[in-house]
Amino acid sequence: MRGTMLIGILLLICGLAALAWPAISYTDRDKVVDIGPVEVTTTKTKHVPIPPVVGGLAAAAGVVLMISGGRRG
C-alpha cells in the first residue's frame, strides 16, 4: 500500500513538473583548439522538449495510483 502511494505521489510530482517546464536544457562543451597550453572551447545550450501529453499522462497515472493505494488500506 505505501509503495503504491509513494509511486503515485512521485508520478504526480514528475507529471506536474513536466507540464510546468516543457523543456529540459543542458550545456554541451566542445574543445575546438588544443595547442600546448592554449585551449579554446565552445559552449552550446541544448534543449530536449517534453510533450505535454507525457506530463499529463504521468500526472493522471499518479492520481490513479494514489486513489487505488488509498482504497486498499
Image (cartoon, rainbow, N blue to C red):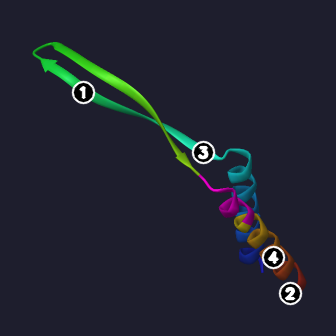
Give the vertical position of 55 relative to 43 (above or below): below
C-alpha distance separating marks 3 and 4: 25 Å
Residue for point 18% across, 20% down: 33
C-alpha distance separating marks 1 and 2: 56 Å
Q: Which residue lies furthest to the top in this view?
A: 38
Question: Considering only order in the chain, which callout, 3 or 1, is on the residue closer to the N terminus?
Answer: 3
Which image quarter holds the N terminus? bottom right
Residue of label 4: 64
Residue of label 3: 23
Question: Considering only order in the chain, which callout, 1 or 4, is on the residue closer to the N terminus?
Answer: 1
Residue of label 2: 72
Considering depth in this image, is 69 or 52 the residue closer to the camera?
A: 52
Give the vertical position of 42 relative to 27 (above or below): above
Which image quarter holds the C terminus? bottom right
Q: Do the residues labelled 3 and 4 touch (CB within 8 Å)?
A: no
C-alpha distance separating marks 2 and 3: 36 Å
Q: Badge 1: how crowded within 10 Å, few (<14), some, or many (20+)?
A: few
Considering depth in this image, is 69 or 14 the residue closer to the camera?
A: 14
Q: Is mark 1 on a helix, strand or loop?
A: strand
- Figure quadrant of residue 44: top left
C-alpha distance separating marks 2 and 4: 13 Å
Residue of label 1: 31
Q: Position of residue 5 (x, y in %)?
A: 78, 72
Q: Position of residue 10 (x, y in %)?
A: 71, 62
Question: Considering only order in the chain, which callout, 4 or 3, is on the residue closer to the N terminus?
Answer: 3
Residue for point 74% across, 72% down: 61
The residue segment tinted magenta is: 50-56
